[in-house]
């Protein structure tokens, strides 16, 4: 059997794991960021199970200076400090390797690269196949006919690169020539200087022609101009850089290859570790039946079999009468529907569980016949319609929606434990099962245990025995009731009473009604636009290829980058991604280039049209619900850190209003009845008004009080001109700064967006803050507050916790500081429109308005209004939106009506 050695570059893989989840880190109930450990564990498990190593090891760097630091002190000096969360995760990675019985190799004074190089050399000499697992490009120099570079790919798989692939990628004859290429071009990530003016393409060309750096210098007289001069003047730098990028394969290792033989994992140690890290699926995958093992590792936790409880089925008419009589006596009841599916519009009710006293529950079983089910709902009407009873649920909007599609309304007040957790423990998982484990130390019965995992073989809840169904459903209601008690305390501790009780919970029935109402679309118009857009997309692609001078795949970022930057040379400072080595061709880059190059403007146009066609024109018709002929989107409250809602299935919040095409797509949304029109009500410049109010910036407040265009007012202040002297360019730049300041824009960011030089952008920002000094002071105070307290707040008290606000890593800390500036503004706007929606809903009910609120698109509300109610609805909507949250600055609402 062929010996196979796998060596993992531990620190590189840990970093990759940490940043792979940087936007949505994996956080345990104990507030531990496990992103790095999770990726590390998945890669190791994949290696052990699918790559069949006979020998395996993990090499780590140490904190001591290496032999390279002694030669060149600035080596790696520009690297950011390690993120704190990653530092905390590293001991768990050590525990993971120990539990898997994988040797860890650390040699002070040597890099992990050198350890890997030495091992791979020994393995090759002894006839082993070696697989080096790392995202680091430097390791490619070690590849030979028995040594392979394994780059972690999407998911947890590996891209395996041998001599042929490495030589093709780097355009060289043999892998060790990578040392010469890196020596010439340098490596910014390691602070290796290289020769000025020589990038990757030039370095590849020189090494391809002359074989090595030494060969280049032997033929220096064949080179010309600035390139020859740079090489002549930097001969020592080139030699030093080559030495710095060369992996040393002579580390005095204590371990022999035999010491690295694969061993069986330590099952109990892994079980305990995975339990602490909450890696359930991974435990199942590695340990087999690991879920049960995980629970066994938590003897302090309880479950349904160990807690005294009384869960009773309700079947007979006498039992139903008793249940309804008891419900009428309560002031707070938790209820939970069990249904045949998750689509509120089409599912049937299997039963409803009720609990109003911890440890107890009753389950009202519904018959399959729809008529008999409706009779049960009739009997429950007094409970559902009673405004004196607080209704508790976990994601209660789902239950209310199911009932609404069965023609039943439910009166509040409401208490949603999912939203409560979102507000007071935002980093926790918000499923009821996860919260029960975290807050109550309780292991619930999971739905998969009843009906199986998702897929064609999953059963319906109607297939579950009554006994199991009663236990499961009543447990859900009972545990949710217990969660309420704990979350009440947490809400008070975090000061979220107003946000929870006055903003979020009253909004629940509003969203239920909006989702139920839906909105009509003109399918014929969507099809016309789709066909028209298809033609325009083809034309746009043809024009791009014409400007490029050749045919290529416009949808390929790799090919596009090569056209823009290698062939057309549109940007001498074009950047490449570390992961793929491809040029960056995102919207930000193309927008900057579009001011100067027609092809970039055309690519932006092509991408925008392609996205709109695929996302909306081709998919919206399929989203129409046959029974109503309308699209019924769903809104989520407990998602974003700022409090903004998200729309999905389909998302109706991202249609771009500022483009002509976006407006045409919006034109396909129509009034559903001839007796109605659509009304749009949009907050005018709401975030700037809020920023003015929060900062107390008098100059901005006065502009709003006088009804003067804020961007023109800002342009007057920035450029020192009178009202008549403001040009369209001045106003455009002022508008960019106004909105950019809310997001902590830098001089670089402003220059990218505006076309100004970085110096001009910096001067503009400096002038802006000299004019609006209070705004600058407020931003500084807000960031200081965040540093001291770890969070920021909206005007209503909604908090956003910023776990990286005091990070030693400057990039990560700066991002948190930008969030600290933006969140109070954007979050206050979100709170304001939520309050307005609840106010409008209440007024409609009080005044018997039959018109309906249909959509919320961030700062805009859309209504379907009866002709005879237009004036009344406008007055209600304007009043509720303007007065939702008085801030001491005028609030304006722009309105319009039409058939579409």
Image (cartoon, rainbow, N blue to C red):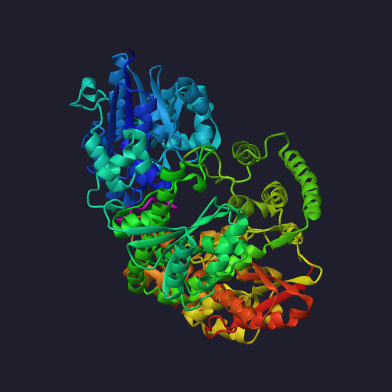
Residue 31 among magenta residues: yes
Q: Which residues are magenta?
A: 22-32
- Indicate the quadrant where residue 624 lies: bottom right
- Indicate the quadrant where residue 435 lies: bottom left
Q: Is residue 227 left or right of residue 790?
A: right
Q: Mainly helix, strand or loop, the magenta region?
A: loop
Q: Is residue 483 left or right of residue 723?
A: left
Residue 256: where, in percent of width, then height? 21, 22
Q: Is residue 104 above or below residue 641?
A: above
Q: Quadrant of the C terminus?
A: bottom right
Residue 408 among magenta residues: no
Q: Is residue 279 above or below residue 751?
A: above
Can the viewer see residue 801?
A: yes
Q: Is residue 238 above or below residue 370?
A: above
Can the viewer see residue 793?
A: no
272 and 733: which one is in front? Answer: 272
């Amino acid at each position: 059997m062929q010996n196979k050695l796998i060596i993992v570059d531990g620190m590189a893989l840990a970093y990759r794991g940490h940043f792979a989840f940087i936007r949505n880190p994996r956080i345990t109930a104990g507030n531990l960021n496990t992103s790095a450990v999770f990726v590390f564990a998945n890669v190791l498990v994949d290696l052990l199970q699918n790559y069949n190593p006979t020998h395996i090891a993990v090499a780590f760097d140490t904190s001591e200076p290496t032999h390279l630091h002694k030669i060149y002190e600035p080596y790696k000096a520009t690297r950011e400090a390690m993120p704190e969360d990653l530092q905390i995760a590293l001991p768990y990675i050590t525990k993971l390797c120990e539990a898997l019985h994988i040797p860890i190799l650390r040699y002070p004074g040597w890099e992990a690269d050198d350890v890997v190089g030495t091992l791979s050399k020994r393995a090759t000499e002894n006839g082993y196949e070696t697989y080096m697992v790392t995202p680091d490009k430097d390791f490619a120099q070690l590849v030979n006919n028995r040594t392979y570079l394994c780059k972690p790919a999407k998911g947890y798989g590996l891209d395996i690169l041998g001599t042929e692939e490495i030589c093709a990628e780097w355009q060289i004859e043999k892998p060790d020539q990578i040392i010469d290429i890196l020596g010439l071009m340098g490596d910014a990530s390691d602070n290796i200087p290289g020769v000025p003016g020589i990038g990757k393409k030039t370095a590849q060309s020189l090494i391809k022609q002359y074989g090595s750096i030494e060969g280049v210098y032997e033929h220096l007289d064949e080179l010309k101009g600035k390139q020859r001069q740079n090489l002549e003047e930097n001969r020592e730098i080139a030699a030093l850089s080559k030495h710095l990028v060369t992996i040393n394969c002579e580390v005095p290792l204590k371990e022999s290859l035999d010491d690295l033989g694969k061993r069986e994992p330590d099952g109990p140690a892994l079980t305990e570790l995975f339990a602490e890290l909450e890696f359930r699926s991974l435990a199942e995958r590695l340990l087999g039946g690991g879920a049960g093992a995980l629970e066994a590792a938590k003897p302090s936790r309880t479950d349904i079999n160990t807690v005294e409880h009384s869960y009773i089925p309700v079947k007979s008419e006498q039992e139903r009468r008793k249940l309804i009589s008891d419900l009428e006596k309560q002031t707070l009841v938790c209820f939970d529907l069990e249904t045949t599916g998750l689509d509120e519009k089409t599912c049937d009710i299997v039963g409803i569980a009720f609990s109003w006293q911890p440890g107890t529950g009753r389950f009202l079983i519904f018959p399959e016949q729809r008529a008999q089910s409706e009779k049960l709902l009739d009997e429950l009407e007094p409970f559902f319609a009673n405004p004196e009873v607080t209704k508790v649920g976990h994601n209660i909007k789902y239950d209310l929606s199911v009932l609404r599609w069965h023609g039943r309304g439910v009166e509040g007040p409401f208490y949603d434990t999912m939203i409560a957790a979102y507000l007071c423990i935002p980093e926790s998982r918000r499923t009821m099962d996860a919260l029960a484990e975290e807050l109550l130390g309780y292991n619930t019965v999971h739905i998969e245990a009843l009906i199986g995992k998702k897929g064609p073989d999953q059963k319906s809840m109607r297939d579950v025995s009554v006994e199991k169904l009663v236990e499961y459903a009543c447990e859900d209601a009972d545990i949710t009731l217990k969660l309420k008690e704990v979350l009440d305390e947490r809400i008070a501790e975090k000061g979220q009473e107003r946000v929870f009780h006055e903003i979020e919970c009253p909004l629940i029935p509003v969203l239920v009604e909006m989702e139920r109402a839906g909105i009509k679309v003109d399918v014929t118009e969507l099809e016309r636009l789709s066909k028209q857009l298809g033609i325009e997309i083809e034309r746009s692609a043809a024009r791009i290829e014409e400007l490029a001078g050749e045919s290529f795949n416009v949808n390929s970022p790799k090919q596009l980058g090569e056209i823009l930057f290698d062939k057309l040379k549109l940007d001498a400072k074009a950047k490449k991604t570390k992961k793929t080595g491809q040029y960056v061709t995102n919207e930000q880059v193309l927008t900057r280039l579009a001011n100067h190059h027609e092809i970039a403007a055309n690519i932006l146009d092509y991408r925008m049209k392609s996205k709109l066609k695929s996302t909306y024109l081709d998919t919206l018709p399929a989203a129409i619900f046959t029974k109503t002929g309308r699209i019924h989107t769903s809104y989520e409250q407990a998602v974003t850190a700022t409090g903004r809602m998200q729309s999905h299935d389909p998302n109706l919040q991202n249609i771009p209003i500022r483009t002509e095409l976006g407006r045409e797509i919006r034109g396909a949304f129509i009034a559903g009845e001839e007796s109605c029109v659509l009304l749009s009500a949009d907050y005018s410049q709401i975030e700037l008004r809020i920023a003015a109010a929060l900062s107390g910036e008098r100059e901005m407040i006065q502009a709003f009080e006088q009804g003067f265009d804020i961007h023109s007012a800002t342009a007057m202040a920035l450029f020192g001109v009178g009202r008549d002297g403001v040009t369209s360019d001045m106003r455009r730049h002022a508008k960019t700064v106004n909105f950019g300041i809310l997001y902590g824009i830098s001089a670089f960011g402003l220059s990218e967006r505006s076309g100004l030089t970085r110096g001009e952008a910096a001067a503009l920002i400096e002038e802006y803050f000299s004019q609006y000094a209070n705004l600058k002071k407020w931003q500084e105070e807000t960031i200081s507050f965040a540093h001291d307290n770890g969070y920021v707040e909206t005007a209503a008290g909604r908090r956003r916790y910023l776990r990286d606000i005091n990070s030693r890593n400057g990039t990560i800390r700066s991002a948190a500081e930008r969030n600290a500036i933006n969140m109070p503004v954007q979050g206050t706007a979100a709170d304001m429109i939520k309050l307005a929606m609840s106010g409008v809903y209440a007024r409609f009910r009080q005044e018997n308005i039959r018109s309906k609120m249909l959509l919320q698109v961030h700062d805009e509300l859309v209504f379907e209004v009866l002709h005879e109610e237009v004036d009344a609805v406008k007055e209600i909507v304007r009043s509720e939106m303007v007065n939702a949250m008085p801030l001491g600055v005028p609030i304006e609402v722009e309105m319009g009506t039409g058939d579409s």
